[in-house]
């Protein structure tokens, strides 16, 4: 079985959606300190479904705002620019990540549900550790496994061999991917993030969410993403085949000054949030 380079696979990818112009513009605006609430409102209202999603989330019990929010400008003030960005991103990738992934033994919507849970966990950890951009952590958690969609679709034969290697040799799924394919889902996911022109910190978090010790640009964000992913695995959320032989880095906890007691508290909070549908952006 001839190994392909990451670039060969990316070059074949035709169905990775380019971000709609509206979403691309929203991402640009939320990253620009000169942007105003009115700039954001102007872009969001171009997309009816995105407008409805933002208003629904702003009025959710998750934010507990006392007054009914009826305009995008109000919602933007309440939620903040980074939350608006995370909602726009979630709206764009939800369909892509909701498909069945036989290569990872994941049923339809399993990856999407798992990714949303990971995103919520990442935001929880970010707030606990006073990371300055909790909604950036949310996006990193949401997109950390986007590479699985490409691996599943374009490397079906190799993915069957990966699963066999995991079961036979008792290695982690990532190790088996590297052995059989030559790269893992985090690496190809980071290439997709680059194609989408996402910030470098997010690209790195996706690339190294299984190996936080390799981070260089933003070690804190990568550690948060890794721990959020680990929390999802601890709870057995839509685990799929790659939950087998999962490799957890205690180094990530050390980077963030978190103890096992802290992790137990965060897991408890995550379980409570999972019962609240309003915590999800879908």
Image (spheres, rainbow, N blue to C red):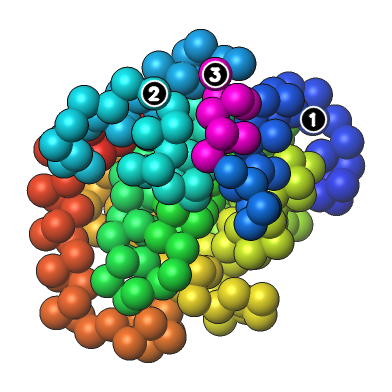
Q: Give SS at disc 3.
A: loop
Point 19% across, 65% down: residue: 266
Point 21% across, 26% down: residue: 68
Q: Could you tell me which quadrant the C terminus lies in?
A: top left
Point 69% across, 29% down: residue: 19
Most extreme residue toward the top is 48
| Residue highlighted by disc 3 | 45
Q: Give SS at disc 1.
A: loop
Range shown magenta? 37-45
| Residue highlighted by disc 2 | 71
Give coordinates of residue 13: x percent, y percent.
79, 30
Q: Tell me if residue 216 can be seen.
A: yes
Q: Could you tell me which quadrant the N terminus lies in?
A: top right
Q: Is residue 229 above or below residue 75?
A: below
| Residue highlighted by disc 1 | 13
> Given contact means CB atoms under 8 Å apart, are the residues at marks 2 and 3 in contact?
no
Residue 144 in the figure: left or right of residue 106: right
Point 19% across, 53% down: residue: 270
- Residue 38 counted in the magenta span: yes
């Amino acid at each position: 079985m001839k190994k392909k380079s990451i670039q060969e696979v990316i070059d074949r990818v035709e169905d990775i959606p380019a971000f709609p112009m509206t979403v691309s513009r929203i991402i640009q605006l939320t990253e620009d300190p000169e942007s105003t609430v009115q700039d954001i409102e102007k872009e969001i209202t171009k997309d009816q479904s995105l407008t409805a999603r933002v208003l629904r989330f702003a009025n959710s019990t998750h934010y507990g705002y006392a007054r009914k929010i009826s305009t995008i400008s109000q919602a933007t003030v309440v939620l903040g620019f980074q939350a608006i960005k995370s909602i726009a991103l979630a709206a764009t990738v939800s369909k892509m990540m909701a498909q069945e992934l036989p290569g990872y033994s994941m049923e339809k919507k399993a990856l999407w549900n798992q990714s949303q849970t990971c995103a919520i966990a990442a935001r929880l950890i970010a707030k606990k550790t006073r990371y300055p951009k909790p909604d950036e952590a949310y996006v990193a958690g949401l997109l950390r496994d986007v590479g699985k969609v490409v691996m599943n679709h374009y490397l079906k034969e190799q993915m069957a061999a990966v699963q066999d290697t995991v079961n036979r040799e008792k290695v982690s799924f990532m190790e088996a991917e590297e052995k059989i394919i030559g790269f893992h889902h985090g690496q190809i996911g980071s290439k997709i993030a680059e194609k989408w022109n996402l910030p470098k910190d997010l690209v790195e978090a996706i690339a190294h969410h299984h190996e936080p010790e390799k981070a260089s640009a933003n070690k804190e964000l990568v550690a948060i993403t890794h721990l959020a992913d680990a929390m999802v695995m601890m709870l057995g959320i839509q685990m799929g085949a790659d939950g087998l032989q999962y490799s957890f880095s205690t180094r990530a906890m050390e980077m963030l000054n978190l103890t096992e007691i802290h992790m137990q508290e965060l897991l408890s909070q995550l379980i409570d949030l999972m019962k609240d549908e309003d915590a999800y952006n879908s």
